[in-house]
Image (tube, rainbow, N blue to C red):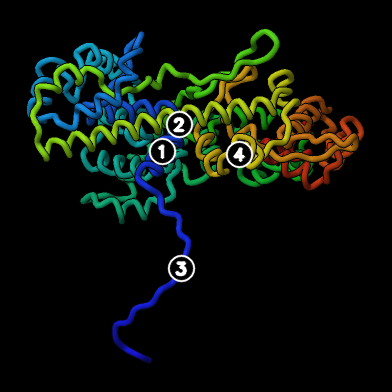
Amino acid sequence: MRLGLHQSARMEQRLLQSPQMIQAMQILQLPSLDLADRIEQELNENPLLEKAEVGYGEEGAESGEVERTIADARIEELERIDRESWNRGPVGSSEESDRKQEALQNAPDSALTLAEAISAELAFSDLDEATREVAEYVVNSLDSRGYLSATPEELVRDCGVPGASAETVQRALAELRHLIHPAIAARDLRECLLLQLESHHFDDPLLRAIVEQHLDDVTTNRLPRIAKATGRTLDEVVQALEILRSFQPNPGASYGGEAAVAILPDVIVEPVEGGFDVRLVRERVPTLVLSPQYKEYLKLAKKGEGERDWVRKRLESARWFIDAVEQRQSTLLRISQRIFEHQREFLDKGVRGLRPLRMQQVADEIGVHISTVSRAVSGKFAQTPHGTLALKYFFTGGTETEDGEVEAQASIQQRIKELVDKEDRHNPLSDDQIAALLSEQHKIQIARRTVTKYRKALSIPSSTQRKVF
């Protein structure tokens, strides 16, 4: 092996992404709400960028002249006039600050966690110090369902409370179950249901037998097996299960949780005479321009090399950002228009009219790479006559029917759901029967295992579990 320095030449192809390309891809991927936040951040950081006023016209054509003049600016004078004349600080105008303050005041509080919600109620209980500390430890050991996996002995060992004993743990659990829920801190579903039986004073041997010995049969809907094992009639078993269904399997479900997130569309599709109009929601994405007001006083500034560089960089940054936002809007609109040209039947008929569509097909039609389409539709939603749906929803595969047409997967799933909704609950359709009905009624040939896959995707239980006795 030769050691030392040497030179060699080689040829290779590499794709180097410029900062402008990276910025454009990032902005393309942002939903409109996130883009609005990014625009506000850029407006605060770059004094050469501003929102276009209503009626903005001729000044926009003068941006080239502004660029030529701005090269001779003196930055101290620029910032002084900026502060004194425009008052464009990082927090914006007083009117803008008032709007932001109002938005903050109207924003919903973040939901309390399960532990926080229970601790707030526990604070008002009359417990001795040791029991309260054990109760706090129990609360912080619960999972999201309100279950506790640790045994009383493990709690005594791990809680770190001096003088804690099994009796202390029992007092703490009893207080929590009195204040919060009779089954809080249960170790599993079986104990959860038993605790609720005791709390409601149900002294029914059948109920207890079902909870203690036949929960697996309940989840698989094998009610005749329960009736045979307990020596009861099927009607008695059904009545007992009605009582059990009134119990709460997750005692922590009513506490904590996450606040619902509103879905705001980026695209709106509305019916117009003779068709549909596809447009972007522009209210949250303002039009950006280079600030034309600089031209009025830049002649006062003197030449300075450091200032020239400072201004030139911000000017380039402003232009790159404006171009990236405009490119994002243009690309998203073109893609959305193509999507709904292909999915016109969906707009007329709903899910049944959905047709197979690939991202590569849209990318080829508008002349971009498939990754651009993927970024553009990521996290974006469209408001349509049939609901607000993710743009990715409209890209789907399909199955060819006997008539030579192609049915989208979502359309087939809708037909399966309709068949299940209309079935006889006492004699539900098997997956084989659903496949046969799809072939007979809609000329759709799919295998039983495909029906099973689609049924599970729709969260529809099996025929055995759907059967009503």
Give the label on residue 24, or none. 1
Q: Which residue is mark 2?
A: 327
How far across and how far down the image is residue 372, in percent?
52, 40
Give the label on residue 412, or none. none
User: Within 10 Å of the Cα at label 1, are there few (<14), some (14-19), or many (20+) other Cα atoms?
Assistant: many
Which numbered mark, 4 or 3, is in the foreground of this view? 3
Name the secondary structure under disc 2: helix
Is 94 positioned to the left or the right of 413 in the image?
left
> For the residue marked with disc 3, what is the amino acid?
Met
> For the residue marked with disc 1, what is the amino acid?
Ala
Q: Which residue is mark 4?
A: 363
Closer to the camera in the image, 185 or 386: 386
Residue at left offset 40%, top offset 30%: 325
Q: Is residue 25 visible?
A: yes
Name the secondary structure under disc 4: helix
Which numbered mark, 3 or 1, is in the foreground of this view? 3
* Residue 340 position (above or below residue 217): above
User: Within 10 Å of the Cα at label 4, are there few (<14), some (14-19), or many (20+) other Cα atoms?
Assistant: some
Lower position in the chain sequence, tag 3 or tag 1: 3
Lower position in the chain sequence, tag 4 or tag 2: 2
How far across and how far down the image is residue 96, in percent?
25, 15
> For the residue marked with disc 4, what is the amino acid?
Ala
Distance between the alpha carbons at the discs numbered 4 and 2: 15 Å
